[in-house]
Image (cartoon, helix red, strand yellow):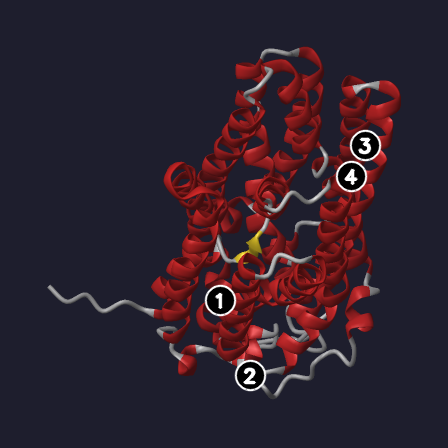
Amino acid sequence: MYIKLKSENFLCFLNFFVADVAGGIGPYIAVFLINLKHWDPFHIGVILSLTSVSSLIAQTPAGIIIDNIKSKRALLSTAIGIITTATIFIAFYPTFWAVAIAQVIIGISATLIGPCINAITLGIVGQNKFTHQIGQNEAYNHTGNVFAALIIGMLSRHLGIYSVFYLLVIMAILAEICVLNIKSDKINHDIARGLCNSKNRAASSLLEVIKQPNVLLFAVCVFIFHFANAPMLPLLGQELALITKGYGIISMSACILVAQITMIFMAIFVGKKADKWGRKPIFLIAFICLPLRGFLYTIFKNAYILISIQILDGVGAGIFGALFPIIISDLTWGTGRFNATLSAVATIQGIGVSLSNIISGFIVTKAGYNFGYMILSMVAIVGLIVYIFTIPETLRRRNYNSPQKLDRSKC
């Protein structure tokens, strides 16, 4: 029986397959280089830093490009192809400079994938159906992460670390097929950038949008959330390695799987409820989970309980991942700067992640894991308070700062 799939269906499948492609071999790069190529931790650290810095620098320009280009499918397809090629290059030429250049290219190209998918999604389904489709996108993406982790775990027993490269190539090919099956004539490029139609005036610059109070305050909340959240899993992984003695990698994998599986359900939840309940109460759940998780880490030191607490990580990160583009869309609707603003705030998010990993590592070294968790929890509480008292409910403010009243029935 022949089933005709819509562009929305291929968007979902694209998010599933791209989950394993978006960052190259990501966290496995360290395992590949240290176990097979005998690199020292310093050079691996330099490589990882180069990837992070290149992504931060390219993030905002990527959003600006996506807002101003109509060939979004071609740009997305090219980014997937470049990441795949650069990753294969690493497998064959694992010298320092070759890997460094490849990782910088991967870092830059990866900044295009998420914003491109969000723009194409908005351009296909419009503002009114954006919440539901983003929930579906995120659910498929997290399912793809779980699938990739399980497959790599099984294949690695027979093929070793090279199974990561094989799987990435297969997933990339399937992702490219999905991109080709998304109909270009279904994408409204005005709506994809946050304009109702071409007759409306776009904001003159990204700065005009970013400097608005609600956008700035939300960016601050995003910074605080990720400053508090980013170091918790790495710190927990280190502590579990000390507790479990020889089962650190298995424990870490369990933490990631528990969180990712939870994120699937949270993404679906956001897609179904964010237009009914509003954004603010759901985002507050994510913020509440963050300090609660940190406090629980200080109380319990049993590996099974600590892994179970990762459900809270899945709740918080799952909600954030789905709501982030939705809230940015609310705040920028009518400005024509949706993707640029999304990428600019993501840059601020990345800065928060980088700073927190350095600062939390210093704190834990000097005062121990429990003190580190407590500090991160207190930071999260500050973010929670800021969000409660400064950010309005954006669901009822979709025309916020738009140049003129928009006829949203046409969007």
Which residue in the protein does label 3 denote? 361
Label of residue 121 in the image:
1
Determine the residue positioned at 55% across, 35% down: 315
* Mark nearer the viewer, 4 or 1: 4
Q: Is residue 313 above or below residue 321?
A: above
Within 10 angstroms of label 4, few (less than 14), some, or many (20 or more) residues? Answer: some
Within 10 angstroms of label 3, few (less than 14), some, or many (20 or more) residues? Answer: some
- Callout 2, which amino acid? Lys
Q: Are marks 3 and 4 in contact (CB under 8 Å)?
A: yes
Indicate the secondary structure of the residue bearing disc 4. Answer: helix
Label of residue 70 in the image:
2
Whichever of labels 1 and 3 marks the residue nearer the N terminus, that label is 1
- In three-dimensional space, the C-alpha distance between marks 2 and 1, rounded to whole angstroms, equals 14 Å
In this rendered view, identify the residue nearer to me: 270 or 380: 380
- Expressed as whole percent of the image width and height from the top left, the position of residue 200 reads 64, 84
Q: Are marks 2 and 4 in contact (CB under 8 Å)?
A: no
- Expressed as whole percent of the image width and height from the top left, the position of residue 187 reads 46, 78
* Mark nearer the viewer, 2 or 3: 3
- Callout 4, which amino acid? Asn
- Callout 1, which amino acid? Thr
- In three-dimensional space, the C-alpha distance between marks 1 and 3, rounded to whole angstroms, equals 38 Å
